[in-house]
Image (cartoon, rainbow, N blue to C red):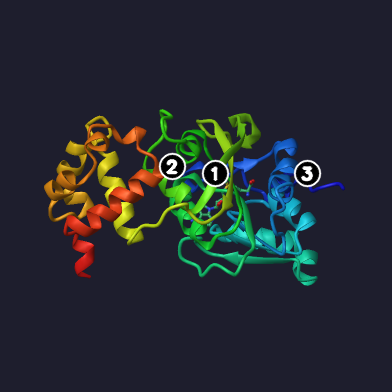
């Protein structure tokens, strides 16, 4: 199947792309052609694919070819107007809906999967808004961020982002993408992550407390867990860090956060919730 040419789309839209608005359009056909495959090869449901940040529509075009329906959200009014005009046929036959607005403000439609080349300035917020929906995602990020999301325990990049993302899904880095694949070119390499939703193998008593506990601990990743728990009660909201340290496993308290698995963090969170008097319990 022939697809719309990314350079012709940019020419018809009459835009160069504004890096200050996170506008880096994909112009490499091979990368564009591979992106929907990361979803369909893994059996992802293409009934309703959500794309965040449509730009000039090069990816939108590829998604319309594989999905029953697509909704694209685009913040820039000029680009949203261009998408409406360029994809008039797809809109008329019900394949495509164009939503003009900020992905962090608009109400997201029901979707079965998302494939998006994310605006990097909001990629973390958008990813963590999408992950709890429990659908497969194929998302382009800055490489460094993608590596942190996909890292496993013991890896250099393992941290709060890895544990939080792993709570919702298996995360794989499927492709790194150089700056030359985009126009205008970003300053850094990019990477595509595929997330496959699943229930975590552990439970936590309160998701918000789990997140703030992790946030606190990983600000002190070079310290022992003992000191990290004690020193970060202002972030985690723990009333009594010492009680948690006293009740927790000695060996675990002597380690550093980078070697503590998501399941061990969950266990410690449960203990902290029970003995550490977190603020969140009072809500
Ligand atoms: C990295 S570009 C990707 C464009 C296109 N999908 C492509 O691959 O060529 C990100 C797009 O998101 C838009 N954008 C930036 N911030 C946004 C936000 N908060 N909500 C929705 N769209 C946003 C930008 O205007 C830009 O068109």
Q: Please state if 264 lies on the left or on the right of 76 as rendered.
A: left
Residue topped by disc 3? 5
Q: Is residue 22 above or below residue 46?
A: above
Element marked by disc 2: helix
| Nearest to N terminus: mark 2 or mark 1 | 2
Q: Are marks 2 and 1 in contact (CB under 8 Å)?
A: yes
Residue sitting at x 51%, y 42%: 19
Q: Of label 1 and label 3, which has the lower sequence position?
A: 3
Residue 162 shows which numbered tag? Answer: 2
Identify the residue under disc 1.
171
Mark 2–mark 1 distance (CA, rounded to whole Å): 9 Å
The disc label shown at residue 218, or none: none
- Callout 1 crowding tier (Cα within 10 Å): few <14, some 14–19, many ≥20: many
Q: Mark 2 to mark 3: distance in Å?
A: 36 Å
Give x and y (percent) for residue 80.
62, 61
Residue 12, x across and y down, in percent: 73, 50
**Residue 103: horizontal and vertical position, in percent?**
51, 60
Q: Are marks 1 and 3 in contact (CB under 8 Å)?
A: no
Q: Give the number of the mark in front: 2 or 3.
A: 2
**Residue 174 vs residue 124, the one in the foreground:** 174
User: Dot 2: few (<14), some (14–19), or many (≥20) neighbours within 10 Å?
Assistant: many
Residue 246 found in image quarter: top left
- On screen, residue 184 versus residue 151, left or right, reads right
């Amino acid at each position: 199947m022939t697809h719309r040419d990314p350079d012709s789309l940019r020419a018809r839209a009459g835009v160069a792309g504004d890096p200050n608005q996170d506008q880096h359009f994909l112009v490499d056909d091979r990368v564009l052609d591979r992106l929907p495959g990361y979803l369909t090869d893994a059996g992802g449901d293409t009934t309703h694919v959500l794309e965040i940040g449509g730009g000039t529509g090069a990816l939108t075009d590829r998604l319309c070819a594989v999905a029953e329906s697509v909704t694209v959200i685009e913040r820039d009014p000029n680009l949203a107007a261009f998408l409406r005009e360029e994809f008039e046929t797809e809109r008329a036959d019900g394949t495509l809906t164009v939503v003009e607005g900020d992905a962090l403000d608009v109400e997201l439609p029901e979707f079965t999967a998302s494939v998006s080349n994310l605006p990097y300035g909001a990629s973390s917020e958008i990813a963590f808004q999408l992950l709890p929906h429990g659908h497969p995602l194929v998302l382009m990020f800055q490489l460094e961020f993608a590596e942190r999301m996909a890292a496993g325990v013991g890896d250099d990049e393992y941290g709060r982002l890895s544990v939080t993302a792993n709570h919702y899904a298996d995360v794989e880095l499927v492709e790194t993408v150089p700056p030359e694949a985009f126009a205008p070119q970003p300053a850094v390499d990019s990477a595509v992550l595929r997330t496959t939703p699943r229930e975590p193998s552990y439970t936590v008593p309160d998701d918000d407390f789990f997140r703030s506990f992790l946030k606190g601990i990983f600000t002190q990743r070079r310290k022992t867990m003992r000191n990290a728990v004690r020193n970060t009660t202002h972030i985690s909201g723990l009333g009594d860090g010492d009680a948690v340290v006293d009740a927790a496993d000695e060996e675990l308290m002597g380690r550093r956060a980078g070697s503590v698995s998501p399941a061990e963090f969950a266990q410690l969170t449960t203990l902290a919730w029970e003995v550490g008097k977190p603020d969140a319990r009072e809500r």
